[in-house]
């Protein structure tokens, strides 16, 4: 099938490449000419495990191409996917500027039988507006569909090719049939292909993200209470997770959620509800708990240094908003870095994949280290902000020799407190009593 994908970010690039990998002819379009030039050479500008190899393979097979020209991309397409960003405005609403710009650009070139499919996360009602706009711009009725994306950065390809479900919101049976045919290769294990109205599909995406964010804020808030009451959140987690009604997923205490989706989607759903005359109570609390959690370790760091971190040499491991990605959008590490820099600390940072993105934002205000142990040299403490696998079994003896002071502030509960204390460290984590 001939497919166009507009926007080659995390979602557009993964979707387009996976569609090509199952035999479709896919043309991806982006306004960023530098990015398109790199992609044409098989140089993938984001870190997503397995993606670079898949892009190269499909480029070589001639099924995947990249352009900056929307006309060239959509001219022969049966399905046109919109996968541009929908960031938060200051008031919490979703900024659809990029989406509407794309619609203006593609409308004159759309084949009469093409279906325009929204993969970007958009507020309820956007597909109806899209249909109206296309009618106005083309002078005819255009078929539209909503197909929200549920992939997780860091495991995006796996999620895409083995989805738990595919959700489509359609107004015509033809659109549902085309999308079912497209997704057939990924649904061979009887995972559901769920057909509903565009409004319900749009809402499904927001509700899924809002519920996941709620679970994270809930466990974080209860972790903070555990600490005050002498309970251990890791034990409590084991106790509740074994209950089949609860489960373990998304119940890891930490320094809050980040990324390009949860923060903005929580705010956008709250905004949409308010615009529809309903004041949500849960979501503002989820957002507020998360903002506070992002700097939860700061109080401990300040207490440890008697309120003054000026000139203190602090190492930070983990900068991306979660492991296996280079994405630093709304990453908790950055909130912490801002606080510590503002208080005059000297920061030595390491991340397996996100260093370049951080360097672009912070320049020479930070010291960057390609290897984790290099960041520790003569440091007064280590802060762990992302649970990369390579941090899970470190050489504590070497760390102790390198650091000036053996103190760890672990925002992801990576270690057993007793073991770290045995290794000679003072150890602060989330929802567990400090040791050492
Ligand atoms: P992104 O910011 O990584 O990528 C967006 C891309 O769109 C960029 O390459 C940008 O240059 C391009 N673009 C902007 N305006 C354009 C235009 N007029 N024409 C062509 N290209 C244009 O965004 P993302 O993280 O891939 O997210 C895209 C959408 O998918 C968002 O709505 C997001 O909420 C949703 N989503 C994201 C994820 C995720 O994990 N990142 C998961 C599910 C859904």
Image (cartoon, helix red, strand yellow):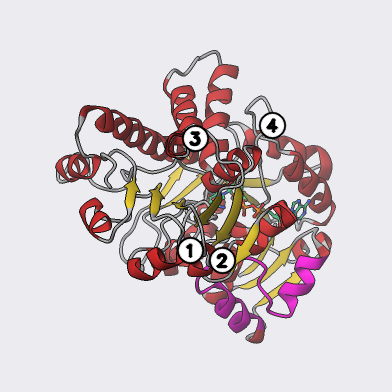
What is the number of the mark on residue 353? Answer: 2
| Foreground: disc 1 or disc 3 | 1
Q: Secondary structure at mark 2?
A: loop
Marks 2 and 1 close (CB-CB < 8 Å): yes
Q: Secondary structure at mark 3?
A: helix
Q: Nearer the viewer, residue 143 or 248?
A: 248
Q: Count residues near mark 1 (Cα–Cα under 10 Å), then give few for <14, some for 14-19, many for 20+.
A: many
Query: According to the image, label 4 marks what residue?
Result: 89
**Mark earlier in primary sequence (3, 4):** 4
User: Measured from the top left, where is residue 418 in percent x and y?
Assistant: 21, 53
Q: Write down the region rendered in magenta.
A: 34-59
221 to the left or right of 1? left
**Mark earlier in primary sequence (1, 4):** 4
Instruction: Tell me if residue 271 comes above or below residue 207 in the rendering.
Output: above
| Foreground: disc 1 or disc 4 | 1
| Residue visible at 29% across and 38% down in the picture | 431
Query: According to the image, label 3 marks what residue?
Result: 203
In the picture, residue 263 is in which quadrant?
Answer: top right
């Amino acid at each position: 099938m001939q497919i166009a994908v507009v926007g080659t970010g995390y979602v557009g690039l993964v979707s387009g490449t996976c569609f090509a990998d199952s035999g479709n002819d896919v043309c991806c379009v982006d306004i960023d000419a530098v990015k398109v030039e790199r992609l044409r050479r098989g140089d993938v500008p984001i870190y997503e495990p397995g993606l670079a190899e898949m892009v190269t393979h499909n480029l070589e097979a001639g099924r995947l191409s990249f352009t900056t020209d929307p006309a060239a991309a959509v001219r022969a397409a049966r399905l046109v996917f919109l996968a541009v960003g929908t960031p938060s405005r200051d008031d919490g609403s979703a900024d659809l500027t990029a989406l509407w710009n794309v619609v203006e650009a593609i409308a004159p070139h759309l084949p009469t039988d093409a279906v325009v499919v929204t993969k970007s996360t958009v507020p309820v009602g956007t597909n109806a507006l899209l249909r109206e706009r296309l009618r106005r711009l083309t002078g005819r009725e255009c078929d539209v569909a909503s197909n929200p994306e549920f992939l997780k950065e860091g495991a995006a390809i796996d999620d895409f090719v083995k989805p738990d479900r595919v959700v489509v919101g359609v107004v015509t049976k033809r659109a549902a049939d085309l999308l079912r045919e497209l997704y057939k290769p990924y649904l061979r294990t009887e995972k559901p292909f769920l057909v509903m109205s565009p409004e319900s599909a749009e809402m499904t995406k927001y509700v899924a993200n809002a519920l996941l964010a709620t679970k994270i804020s809930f466990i974080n808030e209860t972790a903070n209470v555990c600490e005050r009451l002498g309970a251990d959140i890791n034990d409590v987690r084991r106790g509740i997770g074994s209950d089949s009604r609860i489960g373990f997923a998304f119940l890891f205490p930490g320094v809050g959620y980040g990324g390009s989706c949860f923060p903005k989607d929580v705010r956008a759903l709250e905004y949409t509800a308010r615009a529809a005359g309903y004041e949500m109570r849960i979501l503002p609390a989820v957002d507020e708990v998360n903002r506070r959690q992002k700097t939860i370790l700061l109080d401990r760091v300040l207490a440890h240094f008697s309120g003054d971190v000026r000139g203190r040499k602090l190492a930070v491991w983990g900068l991306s908003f979660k492991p296996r990605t280079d994405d630093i959008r709304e990453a908790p590490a950055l909130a912490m870095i801002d606080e510590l820099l503002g208080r005059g600390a000297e920061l030595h940072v390491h991340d397996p994949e996100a260093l370049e993105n951080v360097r672009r934002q912070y320049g020479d205000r930070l010291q960057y280290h390609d290897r984790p142990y290099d960041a520790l040299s003569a440091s007064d403490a280590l802060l762990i902000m992302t649970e990369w696998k390579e941090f899970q079994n470190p050489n504590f003896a070497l760390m102790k020799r390198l650091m000036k002071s053996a103190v760890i502030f672990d925002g992801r509960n990576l270690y057993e407190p007793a073991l770290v204390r045995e290794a000679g460290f003072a150890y602060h984590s989330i929802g567990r009593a400090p040791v050492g």
